[in-house]
């Protein structure tokens, strides 16, 4: 099955990396379009896929089209390609705020649409992607799209009303996590640890902690309690975080992110 990407920014390149390495689709059957030919040339050199500066060429020759442009460009891109796609084409959206209903109105005809929300850890094949489909996409087609999403991490099928929350919890959250890692490293530097070592310790601690949540199935609170010895150092640090509104700040930030996504 031929797949085309309209837009070739960081998220598209991350997805392409996973799809190419998985060999689910041959390189010769993948094409990408972007306004930057220098970027496309670099992607072609790195991954061996086909490139073009024509969105219509991508739309005409692909059974699956990934719309990898920013949300504000969706309307103009859809107007450009909607007359050249057919009823068997699957359109995959990766932008926040672009509902299935909104996209279908833009196409102004029956189109198979899968709405997704990937995240940037896909760049290291550890992405988390939520997906939902409209009524024209078969279960078999959805399963195939999910296999592509799984090539650069993990995926889960969700109901569409959950997608804005997904933006907050996984789509945007890598930024929060990077801020946390940076803060941990700053604190370690304050304590005398060299900067490069501080980042390594902080990042590995976050990676290992996340892995424990996923692999043990234990509640995060229970895992936290395992580290917090009575009267120990960790519970003192946890108390300081709580007194400064650590968890409430994260929850509030996610609500603001979710509201922003709904308005896009």
Image (tube, rainbow, N blue to C red):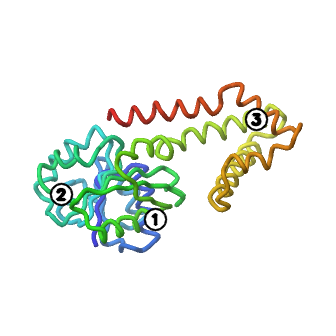
Instruction: Provide the secondary structure element on which disc 2 rests.
Output: loop
Task: Indicate which disc, 3 or 2, sits on the residue closer to the N terminus.
Answer: 2
State which quarter of the image contains the C terminus: top left
Q: Is residue 46 visible to us here? A: no
The residue located at (21%, 61%) in the rendering is: 136
**Nearer to the camera, 214 or 116:** 214
The residue located at (79%, 50%) in the rendering is: 226
Q: Residues within 10 Å of mark 2 (few under 14, many from 20)?
A: many
Q: Residues within 10 Å of mark 3 (few under 14, many from 20)?
A: some
**Nearer to the camera, 177 or 19:** 177
Residue 149, image x and y in percent?
42, 62
The residue that mark 2 highlights is 111
Marker disc for residue 150? 1
Q: Residues within 10 Å of mark 1 (few under 14, many from 20)?
A: many
Q: Is residue 216 above or below residue 167?
A: below
The residue that mark 3 highlights is 238
Question: Does residue 137 appear to the left or right of 81 in the view shown?
Answer: right
Examine the image and state in which quarter residue 241 appears: top right
Return the residue found at the far right. 231
The residue located at (67%, 56%) in the rendering is: 218
Residue 79, image x and y in percent?
15, 46
Instruction: Provide the secondary structure element on which disc 3 rests.
Output: helix
3 and 2 marks in contact (CB < 8 Å): no
Task: Indicate which disc, 2 or 1, sits on the residue closer to the N terminus.
Answer: 2
């Amino acid at each position: 099955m031929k797949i085309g990407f309209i837009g070739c920014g960081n998220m598209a390149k991350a997805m392409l990396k996973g799809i190419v390495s998985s060999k689910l689709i041959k390189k010769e059957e993948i094409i990408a379009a972007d306004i930057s030919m220098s970027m496309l040339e670099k992607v072609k050199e790195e991954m061996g896929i086909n490139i073009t500066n024509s969105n219509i060429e991508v739309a005409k020759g692909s059974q699956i089209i990934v719309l990898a442009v920013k949300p504000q460009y969706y309307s103009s891109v859809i107007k450009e390609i909607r007359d050249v796609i057919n009823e068997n084409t699957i359109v995959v959206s990766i932008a926040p705020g672009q509902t299935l209903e909104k996209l279908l109105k833009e196409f102004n005809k029956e189109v198979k649409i899968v709405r997704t929300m990937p995240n940037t850890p896909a760049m290291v094949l550890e992405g988390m992607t939520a997906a939902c489909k409209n009524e024209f996409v078969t279960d078999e087609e959805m399963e195939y799209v999910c296999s592509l999403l799984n090539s650069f991490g993990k995926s889960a099928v969700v109901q569409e009303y959950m997608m804005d929350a997904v933006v907050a919890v996984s789509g945007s959250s890598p930024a929060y996590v990077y801020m946390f890692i940076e803060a941990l490293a700053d604190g370690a530097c304050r304590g005398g640890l060299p900067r490069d070592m501080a980042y390594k310790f902080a990042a590995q601690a976050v990676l290992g902690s996340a892995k424990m949540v996923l692999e043990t199935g234990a509640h995060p609170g229970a895992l936290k309690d395992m580290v917090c010895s009575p009267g120990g150092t960790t519970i003192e640090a946890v108390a300081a975080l709580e007194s400064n509104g650590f968890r409430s700040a994260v929850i509030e930030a996610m609500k603001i992110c979710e509201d922003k996504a709904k308005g896009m």
